[in-house]
Amino acid sequence: MPLPFASLIPKPKEGEGFAKILNILFYISLSLILVFLIIFFLLNNAVQKSTKFLENQEQTLIAQRTPEQLELEKKILNFQQKIGDFNVLFNQHRFLANAFSILEKLTHSKVWFSDFQLTPQTGSIALVGEANSFQNLAEQILILKGNENIRETNLSGARINPKGNIEFNLQLTLSPDVFLYQVTETKEETKEETKEETK
């Protein structure tokens, strides 16, 4: 027999169960958003406090430095600057000895130079020399003109001196590359030069 109060309890309508689930999900998601916002603000506050603490510690360390430490820091910075300046100077340094080395290699065995003036800025060399004969002088000029390190060769005057030798003035212009590296002779080059001189 049915209970007399059963008719009094309202029966759920269709779709009410789905609406309840949506309400529950809405409140859960709203709660999660609030939790995330609270966590975000707490973390942001902690980060700001940590940053301030680190800044204060840094200021304290700076304030606690002794005059000796400050002087040492200045010296270190000074040395660093000098090392940087030295590197710049070394990279721009011109190896002037290369000009002598090249001229020594290219000098004819019957020619000698008595005066040598180098202008590094332009790479020009003014030479005063003597040769045994005009033929030796001509050979010397051909040797110089045939070298890739010499851009220009100008003979400005030649005359016979009282000894019977040919005095001459020579103007050379060297390639800028000559001054950028250190010329080093290899053992093979030295052997070849020695063989040529003995002939």
Image (tube, rainbow, N blue to C red):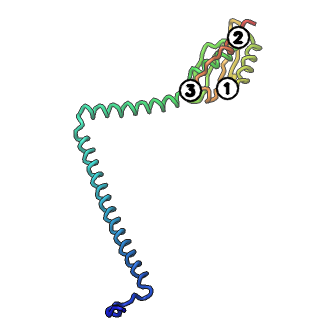
Placement of 6 over or under 18, stated as above or below: below
> Which quadrant of the figure has residue 172?
top right
Residue 85 coordinates in the image, percent (x, y): 44, 32
Inter-mark Cα distance, 2 to 3: 26 Å
Q: Are marks 1 and 2 in contact (CB under 8 Å)?
A: no
Relative to 94, does residue 140 appear above or below in the rendering?
Answer: above
Rendered-image quadrant of the C terminus: top right
Nearest the viewer among 21 and 91 is: 21
Residue 15 locus on image (x, y percent): 44, 85
Looking at the rendered structure, the kind of residue marked 1 is Ile
The N terminus sits in image quarter: bottom left
Q: What label sits on residue 150 in the rendered view? A: 1
- Left or right for 138, reference 172: right
Q: Amino acid at mark 2?
A: Ser
Q: Nearer the viewer, residue 62 or 5?
A: 5
| Residue pictured at 60% horizontal, 15% vertical | 115
Q: Is residue 38 above or below residue 71?
A: below
Sequence-first tag of 1 and 2: 2
Q: Which mark is residue 109?
A: 2
- Residue 46: horizontal and vertical position, in percent? 29, 56
Q: Residue at x 44, y 87 (%)?
A: 14
Q: Amino acid at mark 3?
A: Pro
**Neighbours of disc 1 within 10 Å: few (<14), some (14-19), many (20+):** many
Looking at the rendered structure, the secondary structure element under dot 1 is strand
How many labels sit on residues? 3
Q: Determine the residue positioned at 52% across, 30% down.
A: 91
- Mark 3, Cα crowd under 10 Å, few <14 / some 14-19 / many 20+, is some
Query: In the rendering, which numbered label is found on residue 120?
Result: 3
- Circle 3 — which element? loop
Left or right: residue 39 versus residue 124 is left
